[in-house]
Amino acid sequence: MNIILMGPPGAGKGTQAELIKARFPIPHISTGDIFRDAVNQGSELGQEAQKYMSSGQLVPDEITTAIVKERITQADCEQGFLLDGFPRTTAQAQALDQSLTELGKKIDLAVNIDVPTELLIERLSGRISCQECKRVYNLNFNPPREQGKCDSCGSELVQRNDDRGETVAKRLEVYSQQTRPLLQYYEAQGVLFNIEGSRGSNQVFADIQEKLESL
Ligand code: AP5
Ligand code: MG
């Protein structure tokens, strides 16, 4: 089962990915998490990615597609994968299709989580997440049991640098201009599944689960 999770910043892609992978054992590949880990490690990739992420811009397609291409050929992706935050441009979608064709695979479902902009901004301003296990929380909607500590692994919870005012506005703009048009790309392939994402995360997940079980 090869799945893409789509939707604007704050729609709940990471949140749904955690629920999906607990029920369906496929690897969760988040390009955002890959770049944030690289930034934290101070690697060459991290230094390059940081130039774009800090202002809410997309990391160049050549860098991003090469990472995903390499990742989806790894053995743990044989039974499927869950892409979160990729593809985000038409060039990325075309590169992904080309890699999949070479591997004799295809996308089975592109889940688009739709949430109104005001709610996205509210969610992003309250988000904190675990740098270790990547679990996502929200100070308003989904707080951890103990303040500042991850329920799953006990590590410290931090706010993302790109969740601050101006950068959030830029990310939302970049999404509308460069990523939203991709919905048509997957609609034309007959794999787009639109979902109303302003409900509670368990309700959203129930719809995704039903769809995945029907595949
Ligand atoms: P990335 O990490 O992918 O960020 P994003 O797309 O902006 O999405 P977010 O992670 O902000 O939101 P989400 O949908 O995962 O929401 P979450 O579940 O956390 O990318 C970051 C940057 O990396 C990009 O700007 C770019 O620079 C670079 N990058 C990444 N991929 C790239 C690519 N392919 N090409 C080029 N550059 C790339 O939820 C948000 C909050 O809401 C949380 O607090 C959560 O607890 C809460 N919440 C979630 N669901 C619900 C619910 N149903 N009810 C109430 N609260 C909820
Ligand atoms: Mg995310």
Image (tube, rainbow, N blue to C red):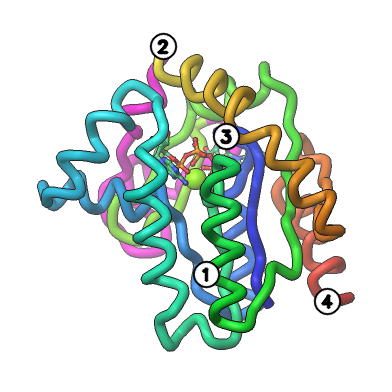
Q: For the residue carrying disc 1, how many other residues have a C-alpha within 10 Å: few (<14), some (14-19), or many (20+)?
A: some
Q: CA distance from mark 4 to mark 3?
A: 25 Å
Q: Does residue 184 belong to the magenta stretch?
A: no
The residue sitting at 63% across, 24% down in the picture is 176
Going from the N terminus, do you reach mark 2 or mark 4 first?
2
Residue 210 x, y percent position in the rendering: 86, 68
Q: Amino acid at mark 1?
A: Ser
The residue sitting at 33% across, 32% down in the picture is 53
Asked which secondary structure carries label 2, the reply is: helix
Going from the N terminus, do you reach mark 4 or mark 3 first?
3
- Provide the residue designation for mark 2: 166
Going from the N terminus, do you reach mark 1 or mark 4 first?
1
Figure quadrant of the N terminus: bottom right
Q: Above or below — where is 158 with respect to 54? A: below
Span of residues in magenta: 140-165
The answer to whether 44 appears left or right of 83 in the picture is left
Q: Of discs 2 and 1, which sits in the foreground? A: 1
Q: Is mark 2 within 8 Å of ligand 1?
A: no
Q: Of discs 3 and 1, which sits in the foreground? A: 1
Q: Which mark is residue 10?
A: 3
